Image (spheres, helix red, strand yellow):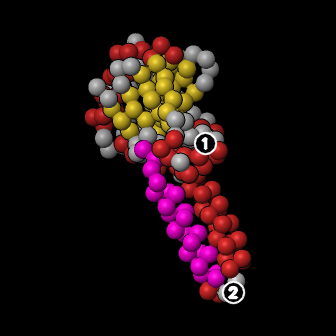
Amino acid sequence: MKISFGKRINYIPLLICLASSILIGYAIFLMFNNVSISLLLGILSLIVMIMICTLNLTKTYGYWEISKRGIKYNDLVSTEQKVAAILVPKKNEENFISYSEIKAVQLVVTAGIKAPSMVKESGAFLAYSPDTVLDRFPSDYYLTVKLKNGHEVDLDLSSSVSNTTDIAKMIEMIKKETHQDVELVRQEN
């Protein structure tokens, strides 16, 4: 059984960037009637548009899947990885986490999002993650997988906020395979 979340990255961001830069280059050509200036500013606008697309790439195309074998996800942490994913989406490598590598799992939820009832609250109080988590991962709803080697992987769930059945199945699968509970962390806005 596989459960997937988010969308796979495709050629739409690249097509949007190309179309925008062509329009900008053409508009500049019409204004100044100079091919070299319009080409230069068209290429510059392409670079700017790609950089703008990288800002929300993980939230828009944060595809990952969980199965009985483990978790597969696209690692789009650095700007270089995001730009490469926009330019050549089919070559985007997927990383794999086996359940034996997992140390702990947290479901991070901000105010206004209802978490599945099977997830236990963390700490004596309701534990709140520091605001730096939001700076590092600008999503309202995600799964943090802490690995035994010290790394953390944040997997976006914001596209599946209303699909609580898949999230509940995913939590049950993690509990069954790792033999530990998924901890709920409520994040203040």
Question: Magenta part of the protein: which range?
Answer: 8-29
In the rendered image, residue 15 lying in the magenta stretch gets the answer yes
Report if residue 87 lies within the magenta region.
no
Report which quarter residue 138 is drawn in.
Answer: top right
Residue to which mark 1 is pinned: 81
**Real-space CA distance between mark 2 and mark 1, rounded to the nearest whole angstrom:** 36 Å
Residue 52 appears at what percent x and percent y? Answer: 60, 58
Q: Amino acid at mark 2?
A: Phe
Q: Tell me the element at label 1.
A: helix
Residue at 39 percent across and 19 percent down: it is 69
User: What is the tally of numbered marks visible in this picture?
Assistant: 2
Would residue 57 appear left or right of 150 to someone viewing this image?
left
Q: Residue at x 72, y 76 (%)?
A: 36
**x, y percent for residue 75:** 55, 36
- Residue at disc 2, secondary structure: helix
**Residue 37, position as x, y percentages in the image:** 72, 77
Residue drawn at (46%, 47%), measured in percent from left and top? Answer: 9
Left/right placement of residue 108 relative to residue 55 reads left
Q: Residues within 10 Å of mark 2 (few under 14, many from 20)?
A: few
Res 142 visible? no
Q: Which mark is residue 48?
A: none
The majority secondary structure of the magenta stretch comes to: helix
Q: Compared to 113, does 71 lie above or below?
A: above
Query: Which residue is drawn at the image coordinates 67% and 73% (left, top)?
Result: 39
Q: Nearer the viewer, residue 151 or 120?
A: 151
104 vs 23: above or below: above
The N terminus is located in which quarter? top left
Q: Earlier in the sequence, mark 2 or mark 1?
A: 2
> Where is residue 174 shown, x and y percent of the image?
39, 21
Question: Residue 6's image quarter?
Answer: top left
Q: Disc 2 designates what residue?
A: 32
